[in-house]
Amino acid sequence: PVPSWIIFETLRIELGDLSARFVHVDEQPIAAASLGQAHRGQLLPVSENEPGESVVIKIQRPHIEEIVQVDLAALRVVARWIMRYRPIGRRADVPALLEEFAVTLYEELDYGQEIENAARFAAIFADDDGIYAPRIYREHCTSRVIVLEDVEAIKITDVARITAVNINPAEVADRVLDAYFRQIFRERFFHADPHPGNLFIRPRDDVAWDPETESCPFVLIFIDFGMMGRVPNFVGNNLSKLLVSVTQKDAQKLTEAYRDLGFFLPGADLERITEAQAVLLERIWGRKLLDLARPDPQEVQELGQEFRDILFDFPFQIPQDFIYLGRALGMVSGLVSLLDPEINPWYQIEKYGLALLKEQMAEGPGEALREAIRPYLGLPGRIQRLVTAAENGRLQLQTSDKELHRRLERVEKKLAQLNWSILAAASVISATLLFNRKQEKKP
């Protein structure tokens, strides 16, 4: 942390005489990060009969903008060098990803933007008494200082304390998942930094409950709205298509959704990828999140043998729009697995997938109904594709021995044994974004 006399100087520059606003401000920070640090304090009372509000004061580090500019300049040089490494360069536009990171970073430096983000998040969940964002005291805020409500609560990873107050950790995990499904698929605006220091649990004292038969009602609290993700309409529509496809276990539509989202390199064998996804969907459907993070080595080996050609080519890339979304979902999966090792994410997937399907049917019942019943008609995936091709006038028959020979040679050349890390990456991309590995960041 920055020494208190330095950080308090910034506070005085921004707010003037502190005694005109605060009863006190603690010198010892309660949290420190790369861009700023937080101190507890107490506002002056608004009336003689009431004590001043307890608050947290988030103060930006001195000269942080200059430091960020130097760091970004160095990273831009590194990004250009990384692009020379073909396995990375053909799968990700690293300089473009860095520029997206830079935009987000500069947004984090503007506390005015964070205040607006917090207000938007609070408005989204205004109808949900189980989700809460702390109040912002705008009259005491600047572009470098935020004063917000002090929410005394339990850190979300403190399972022992959560259990001690009779809150069911499994219910907490369900609420976290539900909150993120709503943010991503409904609101298309999501908290992109859900590390354990930014999510808290507070028991509710305004709801009656029976300790003998019920767990304690609680509120899930989000703080720190500097890093927020936005889902563009095109991406959101295809994410909805992806979710519905997973709900219906429709490998072909899932491949189409990933293709439209930009996850495949040009020339990727989409038919073969669809075959792999059909197998993966069948094998992972209904499994616990923890099982998906720790797959059976024997099963991994079998899948690797069956789809070694895909793994050898590895025709996947990272779309720019998914950097923060993938990161957030990875952190969420780690949190919910910690809270409830038995959690089954398929309930939420089906819940939102079916809701989206109902919306599609309301907008265009004919097309939606056809898509809804297609996976249940009993036709294997290859026959479905054959029928679709015939309907579109694209059906072709080939009997070339040369083509058959070429395909056999291709398979023979790709018998190399590949390690689990590549298979894991392929599986995650091919199955669902929910199953990213844990990327938990320390607060």
Image: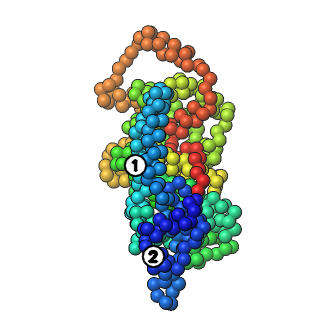
- Residue displayed at 49% across by 83% down: 45
- Residue displayed at 40% across by 39% down: 96
Quadrant of the rendered image containing residue 393: top left
Residue furthest to the top = 402
Circles 1 and 2: CB atoms closer than 8 Å: no
Here the colouring is rainbow
- Residue displayed at 49% across by 41% down: 249
- Residue displayed at 49% across by 64% down: 59
Residue toward you, 190 or 381: 190
x and y percent of residue 288 in the render?
62, 47
Residue toward you, 147 or 188: 147
* Rendered view: 205 above or below 78: below
Label 2 Cα neighbours within 10 Å, binned few <14 / some 14-19 / many ≥20: few
- Marks 1, 2: nearer the viewer: 2
Q: Does residue 221 appear anywhere in the picture?
A: no
**Res 357 label:** none
Q: Secondary structure at mark 1?
A: helix
Q: Is residue 86 left or right of residue 395?
A: right
Q: Is residue 111 left or right of residue 426?
A: left
**Res 103 label:** 1
Amino acid of disc 1: Val
x and y percent of residue 189 in the render?
41, 55
Sequence-first disc among 1 and 2: 2
The residue identified by callout 2 is 17
Q: Secondary structure at mark 2?
A: loop
Amino acid of disc 2: Asp
